[in-house]
Image (cartoon, coloured by chain):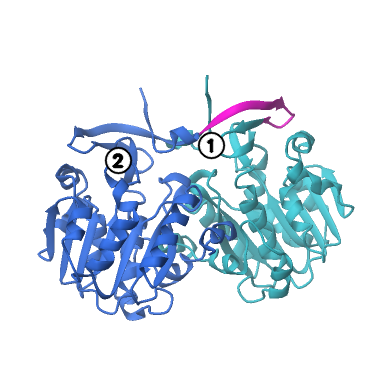
Chain colours: A blue, B cyan
C-alpha cells in the first residue's frame, strides 16, 4: 500500500502538492505544533510542521544557502549573528561556513524541533555542535526585544504567518530587529512567494521601507514549496547586496549546491508582474 | 462537493500537484489524446491533455512570453516563423507582437486542440485570426522535413516526451530543424525542468552542440508545471541571446506580464547544481 502526504498550507486556496511517502519516521506533538518526519521517494527525508512542508533533503540547500550567503558576502564584517527560528540547523550550517563569524545565536521557540532534527537530519543539525553556536529556546520576538546593537546580521528563518510565527511578520518585530542591529547591520526574513502572496509581501515591503534605509526582495527556487519558490526580504542599515558584494568571500565558499556569484545577482531580478508589487 | 484534479505526469515518481476544480467545461477524445478544460479556483481556466496540465490562465503568459521573445529580440530580422505544436495559440500570440514577423506558420498535429482552445481560451486563440498566420494540421517532424532554408526562427511548443511529442525530443528532429532554418536562424524548444529532468536535458544539450554552433538553456517560472519552472533550449546558427539583444525591440513590446530586458538575461543564470548539467 502506498501513502501520499498532502501539503496543507494552501488547501483552502485550491492547490496542494502531494508527495508519496515510504515511511513515517517520527510523529510527535510539542507544545507548539505537530512535527513529522517522512522518508519520501522523490525528495529524501521531509520535515513537516502541522501538515506544512518545512524542508526536504532534495532542496533544503537551495533555501539555506540563499537565506544565508547573500547577506554574509555583502556585510563588510559579519561577526555576530542571530538566527530566529531555524531549529533544523540548516541556516546555521551555512552561516558557519563564513570564517568571519565569531558568534552565532539561534533562538528557536520549540526545543522539540531541534531534538527531532538532531535525530533525523544530522546533515543539518551537526551545526549545533560548532563552538561558536549558542542555542536559546525562547520566543524570537521577545529575545530580539531584549537586545540592543548586538548583531551584525539577523536571519528570520520562520515558518508561515499562521500559528507561532505570525508575530514575525508584523511591523513591530521589524522595529525591534532594527534596534537589535549594530550599525550597518542587515536583516533577512523569509518572505513567502511573489507568485501567491503579493499582498503580504507588499505590506512587508511598505513598512520595511519606513524602518530601513534599504529594502530589496530576492528569491530561491525550492520545488517543494508552494509555487516552487520562496522569497526573502533584504533590509539593510547600509550594505547593498547588488553593489557591496565581496567576490573573494564568494570564491572562498567553494562549490555550493545552489548559490553562486551569478545567482546572487539574478535572484533579485523578478518577473515583470512581480516587480509591480514593489512599485511605490 | 468539491473536485480535485491531480496532475498525472510525475505520479510514478511520487509527486503530483492537485488543483481544486469548479467545473469541467470540456472533455473530448481526439485521435491523439484526451483533452479537458476545467474552471479552477486558483488558476482560472486550465487545459489538460491526457491528465497533464498544458496551461492555466494564471501563468500561461510566463511560458508563452519566454518561449517567444528571447529569440525574437535576438534574431536580427525574424520574418518567417514556424511554431511546432502550440495549438492553443499562446506562442503565436506573442510571436505576432513583433512587427518584423511577416509569416507565422503553426503546425499542430491535433485539430481538436485548436477547436477546443478557440472555444475556451479566446485570449490565446484569437491569434489564429491574424492574416500573417497559416495553420497546418500535420505531424511536426514530417512538416519540418519537407522544408529547407525556410524559417528564421522555429519554436517547438510541445508537450512532454511521452505520447505524440516523443519524436520532438530526438536528435534526428533537431537535424531536420537545422536544415529548415535560413542562415543565422534560431530554434527554441520546450526542454523540461532542470530540477527534475537533468538526464534528458543533458542528452539534448549534448546532441544540440554537435548540430548548432551555439547552445544555451534558459527557463521561466511556471507554478503549475512540475517543480514550478520549465526550461528552453536556445539553438542558434549565429545570434547569441546574451550578446545580440536588440533593446529597442524589447522596449517596443511594452509592459509584459513576465518578460523584461532584465528577465531575458537572468533567465540564463542557473543554480550551481543545474550548471553541472551543461559541463562538458
Asked if residue A231 lies left or right of residue A39, the reply is: right
Residue A32: quarter of image: top left
- Looking at the image, the residue that sits furthest to the left is A131
Camera-nearest label, 1 or 2: 2
Q: Secondary structure at mark 2?
A: helix
Evaluate if marks 1 and 2 touch, with contact meaning CB atoms under 8 Å apart: no
Question: What residue would you read off at disc 1?
Answer: B9
- The percent position of residue B212, horizontal first and vertical second, equals 65, 66
Asked if residue B156 lies left or right of residue A5, the reply is: right
Query: Residue at 44% of width from left, 44% of height from top?
Result: A226
Query: Residue at 78% of width from left, 52% of height from top?
Result: B144
Closer to the camera in the image, B272 or A184: A184
| Gap in angstroms between the C-alphas marked 1 and 2 | 34 Å
Closer to the camera in the image, A150 or A45: A150
Asked if residue B214 lies left or right of residue A194, the reply is: right
- The percent position of residue B203, horizontal first and vertical second, equals 54, 55
Q: Which mark is residue A163?
A: 2
Q: Chain of mark 2?
A: A
- Range covered by the magenta-colored residues: B19-36
Residue B245 visible within the image: yes
- The percent position of residue A168, horizontal first and vertical second, equals 30, 52
Residue A63: quarter of image: bottom left
- Dominant SS of magenta comes to strand
- Looking at the image, the residue that sits furthest to the top is B1
Query: Residue at 16% of width from left, 44% of height from top?
Result: A119
- Above or below residue B228? Residue B252 is below
Q: Chain of mark 1?
A: B
Residue B164 falls inside the magenta stretch = no
Q: Residues within 10 Å of mark 2 (few under 14, many from 20)?
A: few
Residue B74 visible within the image: no
Residue B25 falls inside the magenta stretch = yes
Q: Residues within 10 Å of mark 1 (few under 14, many from 20)?
A: some
Amino acid at each position: 500500500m502506498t501513502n501520499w502526504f498532502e501539503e496543507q498550507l494552501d488547501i483552502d486556496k485550491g492547490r496542494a502538492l502531494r508527495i508519496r511517502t515510504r515511511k513515517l519516521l517520527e510523529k510527535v506533538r510539542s507544545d507548539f505544533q505537530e512535527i513529522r518526519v517522512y522518508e519520501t521517494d522523490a525528495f529524501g527525508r521531509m520535515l513537516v510542521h502541522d501538515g506544512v512542508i518545512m524542508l526536504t533533503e532534495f532542496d533544503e540547500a537551495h533555501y539555506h544557502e540563499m537565506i544565508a550567503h547573500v547577506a554574509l558576502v555583502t556585510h563588510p564584517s559579519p561577526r555576530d549573528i542571530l538566527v530566529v527560528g531555524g531549529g533544523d540547523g540548516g541556516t546555521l550550517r551555512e552561516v558557519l561556513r563564513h570564517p568571519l563569524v565569531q558568534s552565532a545565536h539561534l533562538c528557536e521557540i520549540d526545543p522539540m524541533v531541534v531534538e527531532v532534527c538532531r535525530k533525523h537530519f544530522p546533515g543539518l543539525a551537526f551545526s549545533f555542535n560548532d563552538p561558536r553556536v549558542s542555542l536559546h529556546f525562547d520566543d524570537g520576538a521577545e529575545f530580539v526585544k531584549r537586545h540592543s546593537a548586538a548583531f551584525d546580521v539577523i536571519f528570520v528563518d520562520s515558518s508561515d504567518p499562521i500559528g507561532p510565527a505570525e508575530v514575525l511578520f508584523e511591523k513591530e518585530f521589524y522595529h525591534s530587529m532594527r534596534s537589535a542591529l549594530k550599525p550597518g547591520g542587515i536583516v533577512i526574513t523569509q518572505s513567502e512567494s511573489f507568485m501567491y502572496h503579493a499582498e503580504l509581501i507588499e505590506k512587508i515591503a511598505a513598512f520595511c521601507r519606513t524602518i530601513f534605509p534599504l529594502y530589496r526582495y530576492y528569491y530561491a527556487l525550492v520545488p517543494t514549496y508552494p509555487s516552487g519558490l520562496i522569497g526573502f526580504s533584504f533590509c539593510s542599515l547600509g550594505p547593498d547586496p547588488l553593489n557591496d558584494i565581496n567576490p573573494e568571500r564568494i570564491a572562498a565558499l567553494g562549490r555550493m549546491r545552489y548559490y553562486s556569484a551569478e545567482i546572487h545577482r539574478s535572484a533579485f531580478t523578478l518577473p515583470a508582474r512581480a516587480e509591480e508589487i514593489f512599485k511605490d
